Image (cartoon, rainbow, N blue to C red):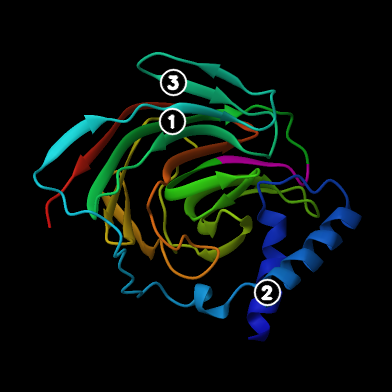
Amino acid sequence: MLSWLIVPGAVIFFSPFPWDTKKQGAIGVSVGILSAIIVPSQLFQPFTSTAADTTCEPAPDESRELVPLRQLDTTRSAKFQGGDQVQVTSYNHLWVGFLGSMPNWCNYSIDLDARLVGPAVELRPGVGWGYGVSVCANITNDRGHGGTLQYAYYVDPESGETGSQFSYANLFNPNTFTYSPEQYPDLLDNQWHHWRVIFSRGVAEFIIDDRVLLKAPLIGRFPLQPSCNNTELLVRAWHSTVQLKNVWVTRHTG
């Protein structure tokens, strides 16, 4: 238990949120410790959940369709470009990106191509940038709900050294990392990368460039969703420019 009190505070320094001073960093550590106490410990167990969304609908047949995307900008300062290839530039660490409504099918997959162009702000110690992909997500009152697989680049506030963090996090507190693969692809290479998220009755398998990185429950106890009914695909960016294209949803029978 003690390790879970330490880790959330420590990872604040890998955060996509700017901690510009030691004082702010200390506050972040305190918040991280409190969140570890408040968030149920079951969330931090290895991802072997057998969660099932009993409210979902079996698909009558196989089908594939494009996902209409909507702009998300709680900062009122982001820049968007439309067309077959969409782009968002975020100058803040708050909620910016794209949303797409998800079906209430028990089994489906999401495919999309994403490219992280680069940081949109001047880099300095304590500032991070990156993007994340979520399904079975919601944004309510400027707070996120659900899980996300995200890639963050950061400048360490103490050493000034640069680094990266690839992790599964909860959207309610994206600084609380619940799992990080030992090996992961470099998404900061200004190249297109293909994401596939296979969703099956409350559990998602995240695949990037044909490589399975994570299988995780998306429904369950807070901060996960109680159901994937009326939820969204969320591609979130912070302090960065992200491009998307070929966003498809395919429903699967069963």
Task: Please tell me whether residue 159 is drawn above or below residue 247 in the rendered image.
Answer: below
Residue at mark 1: 115
Residue at 66% across / 54% down in the picture? 14
**What distance separates the C-alpha of mark 2 from that of mark 3?**
38 Å
Residue at 33% across / 58% down in the picture? 204
Residue at mark 2: 38
Mark 2 neighbour class, 10 Å CA radius: few under 14, some 14 to 19, many 20 or more: few
Q: Where does residue 89 sit, x and y in percent of width and height?
A: 59, 24
Residue at 8% across / 44% down in the picture? 61
Task: Please tell me whether residue 125 is drawn above or below residue 54 in the rendered image.
Answer: above
Magenta-colored span: 125-130
Of marks 3 and 1, the one in the foreground: 3
Classify mark 3: helix, strand or loop.
Answer: strand
Q: Earlier in the sequence, mark 3 or mark 1?
A: 3
**What distance separates the C-alpha of mark 1 from that of mark 2?**
35 Å
**What distance separates the C-alpha of mark 3 from that of mark 1?**
11 Å
Farthest bottom residue in view: 1
Q: Where does residue 139 sit, x and y in percent of width and height?
A: 56, 44
Q: Amino acid at mark 1?
A: Arg
Classify mark 2: helix, strand or loop.
Answer: helix
Task: Please tell me whether residue 97 is drawn above or below residue 6 in the rendered image.
Answer: above
Q: Is residue 64 left or right of residue 66?
A: left
In this rendering, does residue 106 appear at all?
A: yes
